[in-house]
Image (cartoon, grey):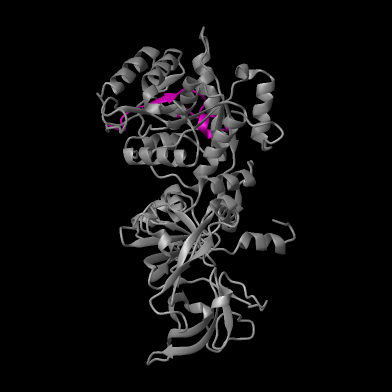
Amino acid sequence: MSTDETTRPADFIREMVAADVAAGKWDGKVVTRFPPEPNAYLHIGHAKAIWTSYGIALDFGGRFHLRFDDTNPTKEEQEYIDAIIDDVRWLGCDWGDHLYFASDYFEQMVACAVELIRKGKAYVDDLSADEIRAHRGTLTQPGRESPYRGRSAEENLDLFERMRGGEFPDGSRVLRARIDMASPNLNLRDPVMYRILHAPHPHVGDRWCIYPTYDWAHGLEDSIEGVTHSLCSIEFENHRPLYDWFIDAINDGREQPIHHPRQIEFARYNLTHTVMSKRMLRELVEGGYVGGWDDPRMPTLLGLRRRGYTPEAIRDFSRHTGISKYPAVFDIALIEHFLRQNLNRTSPRVMGVLNPLRLVIDNYPDGESEELQAINNPEDPSAGTRQVPFSKVLYIEREDFLEEPPKKFFRLATGREVRLRYAYFITCTDVVKDERGEVTELHCTYDPATRGGDAPDGRKVKATLHWVSADHALDAEVRLYDHLFTKDDPGDVAEGEDWKAGVNPDSLQVLAGCKVEPSLAGAEPGYRCQFERKGYFCVDPDSAPGRLVFNRTVGLRDTWAKIQKREGKGS
């Protein structure tokens, strides 16, 4: 399926792809891939990369691959593989039958390495990692050639075969490309292709004790799969000459050249009030600053999904922010803006009281209740209506009552009339307090003629309150989340200071004893809804029968829209 050219997003990568297709390159085919290392969980930055590659394949009627770049067994785990598959599928990306692992190509990679050894373009080096680093040189000084660089092809072939056979200990030898130790691009100064590593691999077990480096494996993986456009983040721009050199070196003198993809780089982005470094995220988890990789405050896709984010909102954010060669930092309010837009269209409305205050309607019949009709989603007429129970004793939000209200407070106060959502007009007549003077109960009267929320005589009220029936309400725990960091840029700290000191101590507030309407009795983990007047919420996996737990996904107030309006940019 392809996107019509008139609706296709415009960016420099799509322009390059369109030019290749128009020129008939690779017979007009477009094949992209997302190649994660299975050594951590994906985060919101990865979502941008996934949607870039998948979206371009979709737009041009091409093919998308999910490929694990599993070349370092000491850091890779099956747990991460499973989580990444779930995350990419949750985002809505379809790779069909094209799920691959770099480790499935290890035999082909070794065969290509042998070709380069035979051509004199690769050699076995006995220098240690520290010695190789010392020989590499600097940006202003050329590197020094290894004393083992002049080994014959025969000797290198023998040593490489013995490396593969497990004869040598870890770190004792490597295979390097013979390129140019004086190249201004440090990546071309005889880069390492293989290192010895006796470690079990999560996908291929104990079959290998030599493993390819990323630079050597990357282009070959793309070539084997027929990838046409290899889309990478901008830090790989200086690696592109090496990507091309490896494939050109293999093809040098070959009767049947291997496929040569095109690598294109684009910039990553960051969000305010969060971090997207694997190392920093790991520190937060291991240091106990968050509850785990799926903590709803984390920018991981696991955390965002648990908090109630939708894949559609992430996709819309990714499309809106576009693709650039230049790094950018986006206000977290922007992705929340797209989240609200999506949830507003799709979330059913319910009533939930987070800080309950008991309210008794004195003139309502004792022991009776009735069902009132409530709208499920005013943005979606097809969502229909539901029945909510109403009775003599209700709960309202404590903040919706003030005994001595200021001038612009229009909610409930002694002697004041307000509307109960979908129900009746009520007037507060009395207040009950405890020995500390805290309000514990309100007494009110209701006007039976205002059923449904309108007065036959046309009188108006200035406030509408949400509520739940005390006899029918369900108990719930509600978790309110705020930004994980107090600063826009958590990494902006003075030398010697710990960036983790900026973790927001108020990023999580747990409310017990909340009350929600009975329609939520069967809500499963992941169920999203709007608590009227309070925000968007999602049922947490910690929920159990008789114990509902809700995460606040995002509040109702659209900070980004206000920012745009203030700056005169519209929404």
Horizontally, residue 290 falls left or right of residue 337, namely left
Q: Position of residue 268 (x, y in %)?
A: 56, 44
Q: Position of residue 436 (x, y in %)?
A: 39, 91
Identity of the residue drawn at 67% across and 37% down: 11
Q: Position of residue 342 (x, y in %)?
A: 57, 51
Answer above or below: position of 193 versus 344: above
Dominant secondary structure (helix, strand or loop) of the stretch shown in magenta: loop
Answer above or below: position of 229 versus 426: above
Magenta region includes residue 183: yes
**In the picture, residue 83 is in which quadrant?**
top left
Magenta region includes residue 463: no
Horizontally, residue 440 falls left or right of residue 228, namely left
Tell me if I can see residue 431 in this picture: yes
Q: Nearer the viewer, residue 546 or 100?
A: 546
Residue found at the very far right of the displayed protein:
568
Q: Nearer the viewer, residue 244 or 158?
A: 244
Which region is colored magenta?
Answer: 170-191
**In the picture, residue 375 is in which quadrant?**
bottom right
Q: Nearer the viewer, residue 264 or 477?
A: 477
